[in-house]
Image (cartoon, grey):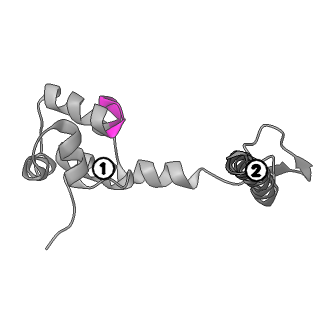
């Protein structure tokens, strides 16, 4: 049994892009307003009309050209071209998208803010109780 696919099997390309986007057939079907069985049929089709292809491309968040030109080899090459360039020759690359804060610092800020909020709410309740006690003592 051969697993070789035809080079221009549009349905399989759609299927692979959907899988790479971690999307289930049901989710794509819902986005297109069609059944999961219809998605299955589309993914088993060698060709698809341009109007439907445009709808699928939009639902997947890619262009028609991305679907038409998709190849496993191209994706492997694309992903293999990534590498960690956060430091070059020991110097820090200032254009990288590295985290500029320590997550624990943000967590502690949040804890401090929650503590202050709690203290304000507690004081508010104490003030209410004092007011109610004064009202009761006046009667």
**Magenta includes 59?**
no
Q: Quarter of the image containing the N terminus?
A: bottom left
Name the residue nearer the viewer: 139 or 2.
139
Residue at the right extreme, as displayed:
90
Name the residue nearer the viewer: 75 or 100.
100
Q: Quadrant of residue 51?
A: top left
Q: Of callouts 2 and 1, which one flags the residue occurring earlier in the amino acid sequence?
A: 1
Q: Residue at x 75, y 42 (%)?
A: 96
Q: Is residue 85 left or right of residue 22?
A: right
Residue that carries the numbered disc 2 in the rendered image = 130
x then y, percent, for residue 99:
76, 49
**Up-down: is 80 above or below 30?**
below
- Residue 41 in view of the camera: yes
Element on which disc 1 rests: helix
Q: Is residue 139 left or right of residue 91?
A: left
- Region of the chain picked out in magenta, as a range: 60-66
Residue at the front extreme, as displayed:
139
Name the residue nearer the viewer: 126 or 1.
126
**Up-down: is 15 above or below 70?**
below
**Up-down: is 101 above or below 51?**
below
x then y, percent, for residue 49:
11, 30
Q: Is residue 31 left or right of residue 35?
A: right
Q: Nearer the viewer, mark 2 or mark 1?
A: 2
Q: Residue at x 25, y 49 (%)?
A: 27
The image's mark for residue 129 is none
x then y, percent, for residue 85:
75, 49
Residue that carries the numbered disc 1 in the rendered image = 18
Numbered-mark total: 2
Q: CB under 8 Å between callouts 2 and 1?
A: no
Q: Quadrant of residue 69?
A: top left
**Magenta includes 64?**
yes
């Amino acid at each position: 049994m051969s697993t070789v696919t035809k080079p221009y099997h549009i349905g399989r390309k759609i299927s692979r892009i959907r899988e790479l986007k971690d999307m289930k057939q049901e989710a794509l079907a819902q986005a297109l307003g069609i059944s999961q069985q219809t998605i299955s049929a589309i993914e088993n089709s060698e060709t698809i009309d341009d109007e439907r292809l445009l709808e699928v491309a939009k639902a997947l968040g890619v262009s028609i050209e991305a679907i038409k030109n998709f190849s496993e080899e191209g994706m492997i090459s694309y992903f293999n071209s990534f590498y960690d360039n956060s430091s070059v020759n020991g110097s820090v690359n200032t254009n990288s998208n590295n985290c500029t804060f320590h997550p624990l610092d943000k967590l502690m800020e949040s804890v401090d803010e929650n503590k202050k909020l709690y203290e304000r709410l507690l004081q508010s309740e104490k003030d209410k109780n004092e007011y109610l006690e004064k009202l009761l003592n006046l009667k």
